[in-house]
Image (spheres, rainbow, N blue to C red):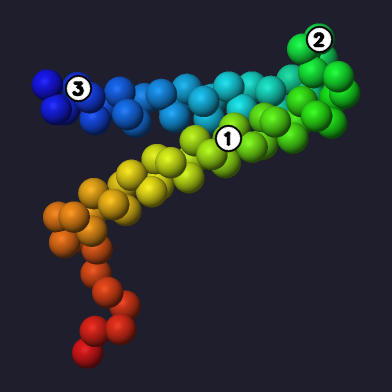
Amino acid sequence: MVRIIAALVLFIPGLISAYGIKLMRDTLFDDFNPIFLHIGIQFTIGLILFLAGIAFIGGFIVHRDRKRQLHKKRNQR
């Protein structure tokens, strides 16, 4: 059950990132979504969604690695 929840926690930000990529791609190919008022706003929201999804997935992986002590410290001698 815990693994299913963890998979969903990673799946939902992945979908958000994919939608952000779709919005940016649609902007570049002049496919305007009528929800947004301007094509620049559409690209900006797509970029924000993409970066937020990737940041969440990256933060989740770093947190998991630090929790399992897999993250090596750089200043060890």
Q: Name the residue under label 2.
A: 34
Query: Which numbered disc covers residue 50?
Result: 1
Q: Where is residue 61 in the image (x, y as percent from the top left)?
A: 31, 47
Q: Is residue 29 visible?
A: no
Q: Distance between the residues labelled 2 and 1?
A: 20 Å
Secondary structure of the residue carrying tag 2 is: loop
Choose the circle earlier in sequence order: 3 or 1.
3
Choose the circle earlier in sequence order: 2 or 3.
3
Choose the circle earlier in sequence order: 2 or 1.
2
Q: In this view, does 23 lie to the left or right of 59?
A: right
Q: Which of 48 and 18 is in front in this view?
A: 48
Q: What amino acid is at disc 1?
A: Phe
Q: What amino acid is at disc 2?
A: Pro
Q: Do the residues labelled 2 and 3 touch (CB within 8 Å)?
A: no
Q: How far apart are marks 2 and 3 (CA)?
A: 36 Å
Q: Are marks 3 and 1 in contact (CB under 8 Å)?
A: no
Q: Name the residue under label 3.
A: 4
Which residue of the protein is positioned furthest toward the left in this rendering? 1
Q: In this view, does 31 lie to the left or right of 50?
A: right
Q: Residue at x 40, y 40 (%)?
A: 57
Secondary structure of the residue carrying tag 1 is: helix
Quadrant of image for the C terminus: bottom left
Q: Which of 72 and 60 is in front in this view?
A: 60
Quadrant of image for the N terminus: top left
Q: Position of residue 69 (x, y in %)?
A: 16, 61
Q: What amino acid is at disc 3?
A: Ile
Circle 3 Cα neighbour tier, 10 Å, few/some/many (<14 / 14–19 / ≥20): few
Circle 1 Cα neighbour tier, 10 Å, few/some/many (<14 / 14–19 / ≥20): many
